[in-house]
Amino acid sequence: MIAVDENALICDLAETYGIYHYRQLPPTLVAVFSLGLRENSRIKMKLSGQTVPFETMLLAGIYDRLSMLVWFQTKDGHKGRNRPTSLTSLLLKKEQENDIVAFSSGEEFEQMRKRLIGGE
């Protein structure tokens, strides 16, 4: 956990247990405290690759299904117009937007552009 994001672990230990200087404790005790962190703690979410807590995704899914059921009963729903926006897809889209690509030179950019277009 320390190798992945030490600052997140420090924040979680301070928030949950009031431990501000974890290096002063025995490593086995810090390991026990780390395993006891809640599933939506910063470090556990980072380790699992989540950006949104599970409960939030579950509630967004429930909202999406309910809004679709209501929409189906409207005139727009019968004609397939003005479909409600999915909160789940918005949350997942934010997650995908974090994939930022940076280039150190114009040549590097052009190489990537050609590869994506199919020139190479």
Image (cartoon, helix red, strand yellow):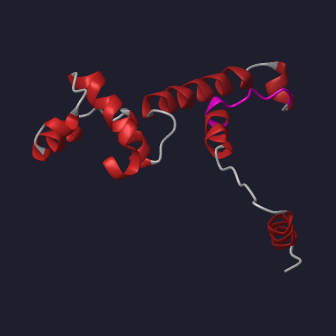
Residue 117 in percent (x, y) is at 87, 69
Question: Can residue 1 be seen in this snapshot?
Answer: no
Question: Can residue 9 be seen in this snapshot?
Answer: yes
Task: Relative to 83, say whether 110 is above or below.
Answer: below
Q: Which residue is drawn at the image coordinates 62% and 34% (left, top)?
A: 91
- Please indicate whether residue 56 sits to the left or right of residue 64 in the image: left
Magenta highlight range: 81-89
Q: Nearer the viewer, residue 73 or 93?
A: 93
Residue 6 in percent (x, y) is at 36, 42
- Please indicate whether residue 105 sits to the left or right of residue 93 in the image: right
Q: Quadrant of residue 77?
A: top right
Residue 66 in percent (x, y) is at 60, 23
Q: Quadrant of residue 107?
A: bottom right
Question: Dividing the image into 4 quarters, which one contains the C terminus?
Answer: bottom right
Q: Name the chief secondary structure element in magenta.
A: loop
Q: Which residue is drawn at the image coordinates 41% and 40% (left, top)?
A: 45
